Amino acid sequence: MSLPTADRPRCLAVTLAAITTLACTALAQPLPRTTPEAAGVDSGGILRFLQAAEKGPHEFHSLVLVRHGNVVAEGWWAPYRADLKHMMYSVSKSFTSTAVGFAVQENLLKLDEPLLQSFPDFQPAADSTHLKDLTIRHLLTMSAGQDPDPSGRIWATENWEEAFLQTPIVKAPGSTFLYNSTATYMLSAIVRKASGQTVFDFLTPRFFQPLGIADVDWETSPNGNSAGGWGLRIRTEDMAKLGLLLLQKGVWNGESILDPEWVEAATSAQIIQNPNATPEQLATSDWLQGYGFQLWRCRNGGFRADGAFGQYIIVLPENQAVIAITSSTPDMQGILNLVWEHLLPAMHPNPLPQDETALAQLQETLAALALPIPQWQADSPTATQIAGAWFELEPNPIGLDRIRFDLNPEQQPGSVTFQYREATYTIPMKRNQWAHSKTARPGPSLTAGAQNSLKGLAPFEVAAAYRWSEPHTLELTLRYVESPHTEVVTARFDGERINLAFAASLLGSPSGAPLQGVRANLPAAEGTAQ
């Protein structure tokens, strides 16, 4: 294949040496492990990164650091765990790009073939010159020529391919960068048309299985395509495996499985996001360094996949390192700044003498990683009054009809039941500790302000805890630990009445004003709990 390239412009586990082998046995074909110093990484530098992470505004969920093909440090902030998948958001795009790479390698697709070649039944308007010029390469480089980004409008339709093709292309394809998630979705649709398989199924024997990646799922479109630009859920170590495959130019376990010319092109700057960026902007932003095939260039010569709210696969070729991070933050540049400030300087060209003191402190810190659990603040006379009671809610935008509280601190776990028009969901909860369960209730935190339809995904694991923050105020915290999101439900009681407010991390309140309701005399259970 010849590709012209552009100019280069608590989980309680600690993955350090042998002490973490047991914690990783749930992972299919884990990467090898070694100590940081054996791989030329200063344990103190990793420790300083973790200390800065604890003090900063970002909520970290996981970290996996790979050097010279070995995991040298990893940790999860409880209740997040090594065995859990995590929603990737736009990191998914880089997996879709990899699927395109395999399709090109197998001569199923060509980078410069017109998009319309995959949709022969679509009849463009006579003046659709730009659409006729649109190629797979343009989709890969976010230069489809649509403006503004049509993704939100397209997601609201039942046929995303047709809606994309009907969207006017107002600029010459390839001329201007504009981030466009449905352009990535079209790549997914094209791979399916060329191969007869969804991107998920197409990647399984070519990528997931050879790399020992299991327990993956991917959100789908209304017609069953992998969403492409978002919706992938995968474990943190498996994120690092994609980075390692790209770092190794498509080689895995000594075998070339992905064309190195594709990798070179995909990870190089194919288009510049803002040709008019000032030197100051270029010096401070990792979003202005150039864009490849669904991968971003970094200020230090590396490249990365990143996804909304703080999901990253960072590849540093000069340092032979891969860093995978999951987190929850509105400031994605801030997390990259911490990596450049602490982890990058910790890497040295040769192995380092063992620093037993720093290593022991790092191990201890990683083992204790945990997010705070809501703590009981007040005893409540209301607690016994509401036990087992249904509260009927006034009509509301999220379709929640009733809610029931079965929370006795002497009987762990209790539960809260949400009854919607379509189904009833009972979620276990504990006082001063997390109760883990799976639920098909996605919660407002996964849908408000986000594109997710969640079709094709298995039920989410949720870690839930409750507390009385005031005598008449009950606070429920639900961490959807296979996503970046947390939902806090606050119930305020006034006699027979309830005021119910929802807050979703990063996404705000999905229902606007608090919901109002009144105690109802209903049987102990109604509907079908899920």
Image: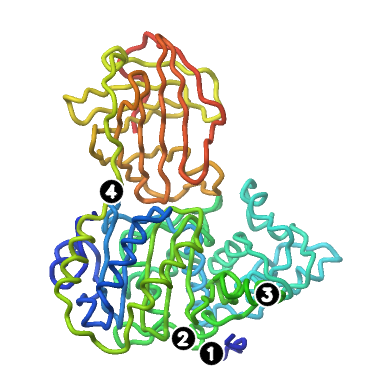
Is the C-beta separation of discs 4 and 1 under 8 Å?
Answer: no
Does 33 sit left or right of 263 as displayed? left
- Which residue has dot 4 on it? 79
Which callout, 4 or 1, points to the residue nearer the camera?
A: 4
Is the C-beta separation of discs 4 and 3 under 8 Å?
Answer: no
Does 49 sit left or right of 304 as displayed? left
Residue drawn at x 40%, y 16% is: 493
- Which residue has dot 2 on it? 259
Instruction: Report x, y in % for residue 444.
Output: 48, 38
- Which residue has dot 1 on it? 1
Decide: is 463 above or below 527.
below
**Which residue type does callout 3 highlight?**
Thr
- Return the disc, 2 or 1, that comes first in the chain's sequence: 1
**Which residue type does callout 4 highlight?**
Pro
Instruction: Report x, y in % for residue 83.
Output: 26, 57
Instruction: Determine the secondary structure under disc 4.
Output: loop
How far apart in space, not on screen, are marks 4 and 3 (Cα)?
42 Å
The answer, for residue 435, to whether it is visible in the render is yes
- Return the disc, 2 or 4, that comes first in the chain's sequence: 4
- Return the disc, 2 or 3, that comes first in the chain's sequence: 2
